[in-house]
Image (cartoon, helix red, strand yellow):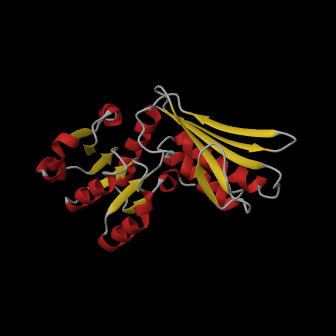
Amino acid sequence: MKIALIGYGKMGKLVEQIAQQRGHTIVARIDVDNINEIHSEAFRSADVAIEFTTPNTAVANYRMAWQEGVKVVSGTTGWTNQLQDLRNEIDAHGYTLFWASNFSIGVNLFFEANRRLAQLMNPYIQYDVRMSETHHTEKKDAPSGTAITLAEQIIGCLDYKSKWCLGTKATDSNAIPIEAIREGKVPGIHTVVYDSNADTITFTHAAKSREGFALGAVVAAEFTTTHQGFLTMKDLIGF
């Protein structure tokens, strides 16, 4: 498989390493200093582009890749207020975007367990819920896309929660507070806490490195070469 990389920072380099280990070829490396090369023959030769950039540039990157006839796999978060518009474009023009707030297989199993736990907790309104997420200091968005996904799952299951907010406490009892911590080189820790006067239930996923994210992105790219439209980890894993 021929892969183009959009974003050649730490994640891009790790994706490159794992892709090559799996027998794939990197045909283009696009970063801020050579963004116009996304319009090159080398880029157009790719079966798929893997994109890890910033919330402010991701959507433009998708559109440029689609203009060149290249499918996109992306793990960039912080832009999903534009998701519906993009899905309309995908449906109208036959584009392909595989997007995940987190490509880790473990995190996606954590998502499923989170949803099930929230369903079980729904009758027990004595349990308030809060969240925290910890990442390395280079992470641009807060809260993380993974934390937002977890919060939205909980909101979909709990009748007494309707939104999330950034911070350690919620001024609205219907909101789930999400504390965003940035320190060191932490690849990612996400915790959901259900707290009552009687006891506390704590539910945590801690990534040990970024390799699980990079491997998941490459596996998603392999999947995307034979699929079309708007794709997610549910399509890949089969939940």
- Residue at the far left: name it: 41
Q: How many numbered callouts?
A: 0
- Residue at figure coordinates x 41%, y 55% from the top left: 79
Toward the right, the furthest residue is 198
Locate residue 68, reporting x and y percent: 19, 58
Q: Quadrant of the C terminus?
A: bottom right
For this orientation, the residue located farthest to the bottom is 92
Residue 87 in which image quadrant: bottom left
Q: Where is residue 135 in the image (x, y as percent from the top left)?
A: 50, 34
- Relative to 30, 193 lies left or right: right
Judged left or right of residue 142, residue 117 is: right
Q: Where is residue 78 in the image (x, y as percent from the top left)?
A: 43, 51
Residue 132 drawn above or below residue 186:
below
Q: Which residue lies furthest to the front in this view?
A: 171
The vertical placement of 96 against 216, above or below, is below
From the viewer's perspective, is residue 21 above or below residue 80?
above
Image location of residue 104, percent across then percent down: 50, 40
- Observer able to see residue 28: no
In the image, 12 versus 2, the foreground residue is: 12
Q: In this view, does 229 lie to the left or right of 239?
A: left
Residue 133 appears in view:
yes
Q: Is residue 39 left or right of residue 166?
A: left
**Quarter of the rendering occupied by the N terminus:** top left
Please name the residue shown 27% across and 60% down the image: 63
